[in-house]
Amino acid sequence: MCGIVGYIGHRESYPIIIQGLKRLEYRGYDSAGIALLNGGLRHYKCKGKVSDLEKVSEGQNIGGSIGIGHTRWATHGIPNDVNSHPHVSQSGRLALIHNGIIENYASLKEALVRRGFHFHSDTDTEVLVNLIEDIMIGEDIGMEEGVRIALNQVVGAYAICVVDKEQPDRIVVAKKGSPLVIGIGQGEYFIASDATPFIEYTKNAVYLNEDEMAVIQLGAPLEVRSLNNNKLVDPYITKLQMDLEAIEKGGYDHFMLKEIYEQPRSIYDSLRGRLLVDRGIIQMAGLEEYKEKFLHADRIIIVACGTSWHAGLVAEYIFEDLARIPVEVEYASEFRYRNPIIGEKDVVIAISQSGETADTLAAIKLAKSKGATIFGICNVVGSSIARETHAGAYTHAGPEIGVASTKAFTAQVSVLSLIALYLGKENGTIKSSDFQRMLIELNAIPSKIERMLESDKTIREISARFKDSHNFLYLGRSYNFPVALEGALKLKEISYIHAEGYPAAEMKHGPIALIDENMPVVVIAPMISHYEKIVSNVQEVKARNGRIIAIVNKADTEIRATAEYVIEVGDTMDVFTPLLTTIPLQLLSYHIAVMRGCNVDQPRNLAKSVTVE
Ligand code: AGP
């Protein structure tokens, strides 16, 4: 996701836009830019933060009372000056900023190239601004109609602002799938991805609806239209109640909670364009290019740290079960120093949300130097790890601000599941009918999570009951053993309660000595294969007076009869259970940490990205 800001009114637009972009840097911060109408169209942009943009525009002509600005979170094209927004049309007449993804940009670009357009960037946004220009010239129409016709040719998500140096008294905006709000002041209008950039100027706001556009003109009332039929829409003015900080967090108390609730969207975005259920196929360019390396690999070595390492453990189960390719999962910090045996027939998958974790980066450099093929799963386009790999597949989870990783984990597991499915199909180790069923089921995961997030009342009750515990145990089997580790890490890192995750069957080899009436034991027990085994494990804990909190399916009866508390999760195929069972554990750790008065988003001693050894 990116941040967009616009201003038109009686004040200087530059300072308002720059301040607004700084407030939106949580939405995207790999590059920034601004376009100003002041007797001409001027634009300044660069890789880096808004403060870098200020340096670039220092001393330049930054006057004027109409402007648009952008902070980027790259999805197409690495972060660099050329790919930064605004993008200007070929004639230099239009400037456009965009938050979203245009899925059919390649075909639109081909048509424009045939019509004589040249492109400088790798972005989908540059295609859109030239499509609008092409239509305006071809049909001899103004910017408003040109934008509307162009957007009816676009497939994808967008929130855009467009300015035209030949119509220097207006800004045209449009929305589909990405947020856009218009602040209505006294003789001035503000435009932004959320209300933080203008909250101190006005509390009157119009949130554009899907498939709507607006013409925002100096001295004229706001004109909102339907993109589909161009009919005028009566704008609904909302009176904003939230303060600045609350808006940044989307109304949630913490970024972590916001990111937990973003997971249906972040998983959908990570699967979009790759999981094509209607066609019954998986499309992943980087993977397809290296599929022979995967299919003929001696083994896949997964290197990662922390939560990303847990995603790697889930992947080990999935890859070996579905694609029958040997997998090893290594802590990057250990792998890089233990003089590992690495060959040219090894494929190394590096998993990293930040793409900057020093141990993971060093591990893949070592593997690369020994001839292995390196494949990256990163959440930051153009990050150091992404640039070090031969190929990769980005998670499109959007910026993850909370130090405790949540949506990045489920996005990683989603993408890794796609890869395993693809390789299993190519390997012939997944029957075609099973493959289709799995595609359909994976596609349904976001809506299943949506339903689970509707009520976390039970989780709050449990949190209140156990917030003062000194220790927790988390138990899981099969695909859910890594989830037990992840649940324990979440609790540890934000509530500072000691917690350990174990394979449920491992209890009898020592840890069961810890069980007594003071030990909360979270058991992750969906009704998947070997369910009867975990029922026994739960009874072993119960027999020693452990306090059992069970994550179960609706149809479960046996564990419900034994557990003190149960949290229900949706039903799904064994292989996809981690995507569902992780969610209540994220919420449990969140609520306990809040009740303990901990700094949930920035826990003590921790950094969001460990770029040091
Ligand atoms: C997880 O909640 C922690 N923030 C931490 O373990 C994190 O997963 C680890 O540092 C790896 O970070 P990365 O995914 O950015 O490489």
Image (cartoon, grey):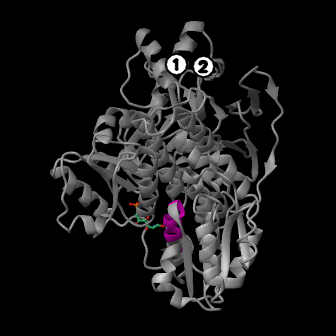
Judging depth in this view, the residue of 343 and 196 nearest the camera is 343
* Disc number placed over residue 186 in the picture, else none: none
Residue 461 lies, in percent from the top left, at 75, 77
Q: Is residue 501 above or below residue 266?
A: below
Q: Secondary structure at mark 2?
A: loop
Residue 440 lies, in percent from the top left, at 62, 38
Residue 405 lies, in percent from the top left, at 50, 63
Per the image, the residue denoted by label 1 is 131
Residue 487 is inside the magenta segment: yes
Per the image, the residue denoted by label 2 is 153
Image point (36%, 47%), residue name: 325
Quarter residue 287 falls in: top left
Q: Is residue 408 above or below residue 59?
A: below
Q: Is residue 299 left or right of residue 147?
A: left
Image point (73%, 80%), residue name: 564
Give the residues in magenta: 479-488
Q: Secondary structure at mark 1?
A: helix
Of mark 2 and mark 1, the one earlier in the sequence is 1
- As measured in the structure, the alpha-carbon distance from the residue carrying label 2 to the one carrying label 1 is 9 Å
Quadrant of the drawing holding the C terminus: bottom left
Q: Is residue 429 left or right of residue 436?
A: left
Contact (Cβ within 8 Å) of mark 2 with mark 1: yes
Q: Amino acid at mark 2?
A: Gln
Please rate how many residues cluster around mark 2, counting C-alpha atoms within 10 Å: few if below 14, some from 14 to 19, many from 20.
few
Q: Amino acid at mark 1?
A: Leu
Image point (21%, 54%), residue name: 367
